[in-house]
Amino acid sequence: MTTQMSSVKAARHHRDARRRDRLEYRALVAISFVPCLAVATLRRFGPDWQAGTSVFAEALSSARAAAGYALLV
């Protein structure tokens, strides 16, 4: 026999799950930002350096991409 959650509890559960997902995503971005920043900084000394992009913007973009792939697993 299964019991159904009330609509208020279901809405709260859904909202809490979304909040938890956002926090997990932000934590993954924060954790992966440090190595991405190191790599982006090292790439500045290489031949494929592109002027006009910030080191922090490049690292943040890479960290967001890495976090997105981590959530697919």
Image (spheres, helix red, strand yellow):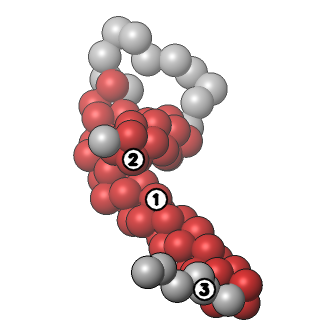
Give coordinates of residue 24: x percent, y percent: 42, 65
Q: Earlier in the sequence, mark 3 or mark 2?
A: 3
In the displayed structure, does residue 18 sit left or right of residue 68?
A: right
Name the mark nearer the viewer: 1 or 3: 3
Residue under numbered circle 2:
71
Front one among 25 and 46: 25
**Marks 1/3: CA–CA distance:** 27 Å
Front one among 67 and 39: 67
Front one among 61 and 69: 69
Give the SS element for disc 2: helix
Residue lying farthest right? 7
Residue lying farthest top? 47
Work out whether 9 lies above or below 11.
below
Question: In which quadrant will I find the N terminus?
Answer: bottom left
Residue 38 bears which disc, if any? Answer: none
Residue lying at 67% horizontally and 89% vertically, measured from the top left: 6
Residue lying at 47% horizontally and 80% vertically, measured from the top left: 2
> Callout 2, which amino acid?
Leu
Residue under numbered circle 1:
25
**Marks 1/2: CA–CA distance:** 8 Å
Residue under numbered circle 3:
5
Give coordinates of residue 50: x percent, y percent: 52, 17
Question: In which quadrant will I find the C terminus?
Answer: top left
